[in-house]
Image (spheres, rainbow, N blue to C red):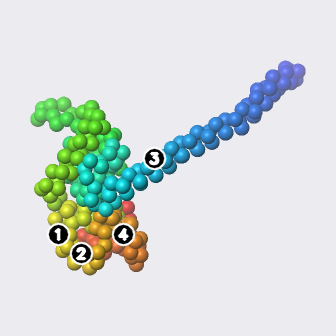
Amino acid sequence: MAKEATDGEKKSKPKRSKLWRLLPVSLILIGLFLTVLFGLRSVRSFRQVQYIEQQGLDRGGASVDAIQPWMTIRFIAVAYAVPEEYLYSALNVAFNRRNADRPIGHIRPVSTPGANGPPSTPIPDSDTAIVEKAKAAVLAYQADPVATGLRDIRPWMSLRYISNSAGIPLGDLFIKIGLSPTLNPDKPLDLLAEEMDYPGGPRSLVDMVAEALGMATGGGRQ
């Protein structure tokens, strides 16, 4: 029995030795994979930032032709000051499939069944088709703005977005919240607070705007 155990140990040693030799190689390969992955993401993010600045998407003056499949519903909503609810409705996205942070190129609208029809199912759609629908939605809103209303104020919202959604003229909004009309109305509140060095930071600015509009505070916590 002792001899058999010894023979078994001798056979297992080469296997263990081989595994230990492969471990550094495996770690190097994993490291290279992660480096390439995060490197590509960094390059993509850099190009997107460049594109945003070139197209004026951060200044509220961009053409709808600047809309791309990688943009999210929320990004488009803020860039063009169009309420999210309006965009979801125009793109025919079901309530239980709504995700403001999902690129529109990944969004698939649903069919509208009849009274006795089957449950709604995703409609196959191309990136080009969904982008064209988003462009048409923005243009339709700009031609005939609709105040969808606001339940609360969030850090990602810009003053122009709040103005359009709440149905308050931008000039009146500045007066109501007591801020200088020279501020960039197309910059999200969290970035605006940092730019202004607002006392208490983004959360305080969000709460101040909410209070000025008679809404519940606390939107800056999420």
- Image coordinates of residue 65 in percent, x first then y, are 26, 47
- In contact (CB < 8 Å): disc 1 and disc 4: no
Q: CA distance from mark 1 to mark 2?
A: 9 Å
Q: State how many labels appear.
A: 4
Secondary structure of the residue carrying numbered label 1: loop
> Residue at position x 71%, y 38% from top?
24
> Residue at position x 18%, y 51% from top?
139
Q: Residue furthest front?
A: 54
Q: Is residue 197 above or below residue 51?
A: below
For the residue marked with disc 1, what is the amino acid?
Pro
Left or right, 212 with respect to 203, comes to left
User: Mark 1 vs mark 3: which is more N-terminal?
Assistant: 3
Residue under pointer 3: 44
> Residue at position x 17%, y 54% from top?
141
User: Mark 1 vs mark 2: which is more N-terminal?
Assistant: 1
User: Mark 1 vs mark 4: which is more N-terminal?
Assistant: 1
For the residue marked with disc 2, what is the amino acid?
Phe
Residue under pointer 2: 174
- Image coordinates of residue 6 in percent, x first then y, are 86, 24
Residue under pointer 1: 169
Residue under pointer 4: 192
- Image coordinates of residue 15 in percent, x first then y, are 76, 26
In the picture, the quarter occupied by the N terminus is top right
Q: Nearer the viewer, mark 4 or mark 3?
A: 3
For the residue marked with disc 4, what is the amino acid?
Leu
For the residue marked with disc 3, what is the amino acid?
Arg
